[in-house]
Image (tube, rainbow, N blue to C red):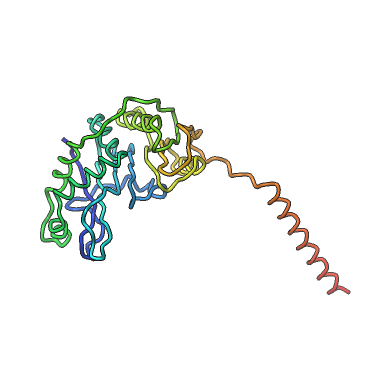
Amino acid sequence: MIANAYLMTRGTPRRNDYAFLGAVPPSRWWDRVNPYVFMESPEVVVARHPGGVGVLISGLPSARRDVIGTAIRHTVVIDDLRDQPELLCRIVAAGLDPRTRTALGEHLDEEFDAGRVDAIMDGGDAGTDVPQRVAEILATVSADVPGPGRDPEGSWVGGADDEGSRRAFLARVRRLAAEEASGFAFTSQAIATARGAGEAAGRLGAPVAILLVDGDVDGVQPLGKDRPLPPERRSPALLMTGLALTGVAVAVILWWIARRVL
């Protein structure tokens, strides 16, 4: 049984903006990767944190809409699944698959319809059973978990559509659960290049495994020792143009000084 499961969504009225229902995670361990993901979109974040191994799945679709007709989404958070690595991998695999994401959103809608969500957010319903209900839904999630892949040491980046990268990602998740690795494993719709992934690894200062959703990456690419990649070199043409403009500016200044003196 999952011990701590949480659900974030919003209600129909404008006043009922996105918030956790019934219970709030004791810490926002995922905040460190917020600059590198779009929480409004489908993302998966797994992290080794002081309380264990947490997983967050955002952007789960809901059939509900708010008062102005905007589609509503769900985000689920589990604080610790160290003791259930297979369930952890199954939940992560579900988060990576658009079909199971949709099914998970439908299950959450069935359990928490518009009336129930608004009642909890308005204070008429304490929502004390939300963690248990969410845990029950996640415990029965059905997803195909591919066989183990090769997870390189340190930081690396791969493509979310590449089977080998997904296998390596799940291998990293297993290692995080087994305390054989530290850091983060997450998808990213905010990063588009291997260079950007390297810079994220450097800023996080911890090993990362990143699956780029829209990036152009072939297979699994190591990112070095968790340091930013060197800045791109300026092209010779741009450098020569800059020097030429500097020379012109100096010449104009000297001409102006000469006129003032004379």
Q: Quadrant of residue 179?
A: top left
> In the shown orientation, is residue 125 left or right of residue 179?
left
Outermost residue, right direction?
262
Q: In which quarter of the image is the C terminus?
A: bottom right
In the rendered image of this protein, does residue 4 appear above or below residue 72?
Answer: above
Residue in view at x 76 percent, y 56 percent: 244
Q: Quadrant of the N terminus?
A: top left
Q: Nearer the viewer, residue 254 or 162?
A: 162
**Residue 4's spot in the image, x, y percent?**
20, 42
**Residue 144's spot in the image, x, y percent?**
26, 31
Q: Nearer the viewer, residue 84 or 109?
A: 109
Q: Nearer the viewer, residue 164 or 4?
A: 164
In the rendered image of this protein, does residue 73 appear above or below residue 262?
Answer: above
Residue in view at x 38 percent, y 46 percent: 32
Q: How many marks?
A: 0
**Residue 148's spot in the image, x, y percent?**
34, 25
Q: Nearer the viewer, residue 238 or 54?
A: 238
**Residue 107's spot in the image, x, y percent?**
17, 45
> In the shown orientation, is residue 260 left or right of residue 241?
right
> In the shown orientation, is residue 149 left or right of residue 72?
right
Residue in view at x 33 percent, y 36 percent: 48
